Image (spheres, helix red, strand yellow):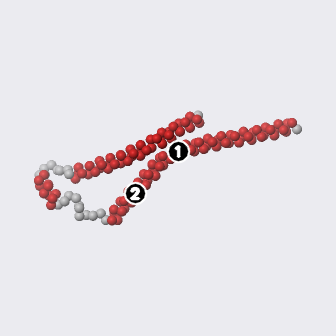
Amino acid sequence: MKLKLLDVLTASLVTLAILYPGIIVFNLICGRHIELVNTQNLSCQVTKIKKGYNPLSLQLESINTPQFPANRKLSRHNFFVQLQILAEQYKIATILQWLVLFTPIGIGFGILGYDRYLVYRAAVLKAQVEMLERLWQQSIEQ
């Protein structure tokens, strides 16, 4: 039973080690795709034209009054806070990726270590039993 569990764990660790780079790349691609979709949705919302408006009048209005608040600038504090939040999210994501990788490996090493400990304890117990049997045989002979 222990050998089967060890074989399954070894196979899962090797599979995870082989697939982990692919998982990271897939995660990066999905993140970029979500950003692209959000950007496209925002651009569609900005250029959405309501029914009943004359396109020429809409163009004249947009030339006179810009739709985007270009005059409004981000304060440096707000910009740095946003950068700090992004950096913390990246750090957390990196830590979680390493945790996902090393958790099964740590569990595997724990199982291997415990198995070796059980073998060691069995050997010590066997040596103690042999010593007690020798002492018992000596006490019988005397």
Left or right of 107: which side holds 49? Answer: left
Label ID, residue 105: 1
Q: Position of residue 101 (x, y in %)?
A: 48, 46
Position of the C terminus, as image quadrant, is top right
Q: Nearer the viewer, residue 1 or 9?
A: 9
Name the residue located 43 percent from the left edge and 55 percent from the top edge: 91
The residue depicted at 45 percent of the width and 48 percent of the height is 97
Residue for point 15% across, 59% down: 63
Where residue 14 sits in the image (x, y, percent)?
Answer: 50, 40
Residue 86, placed above or below residue 110? below
Q: CA distance from mark 2 to mark 1?
A: 27 Å
Residues packed near mark 1 inside 10 Å, few (<14), some (14 to 19) or many (20 plus)? some
- Amino acid of disc 2: Ala
Residue 87: which numbered mark, if any? 2
- From what the image shows, is residue 75 above or below residue 45? below
Q: Nearer the viewer, residue 50 or 126?
A: 126
Numbered disc 1: secondary structure:
helix
Q: Residues within 10 Å of mark 2 (few under 14, many from 20)?
A: few
Quarter assignment of residue 60: bottom left
Q: Quadrant of the N terminus?
A: top right
Q: Residue at x 32, y 47 (%)?
A: 33
> Horizontal and vertical percent for residue 96?
45, 50
Query: Is residue 53 left or right of 140 when viewed as pictured?
Result: left
Q: Earlier in the sequence, mark 2 or mark 1?
A: 2
Amino acid found under the numbered disc labelled 1: Ile
Asked if the residue under mark 1 is in contact with the one under mark 2, i.e. CB atoms within 8 Å, the reply is no
Above or below, 138 against 54 in this view is above
The residue furthest bottom is 76
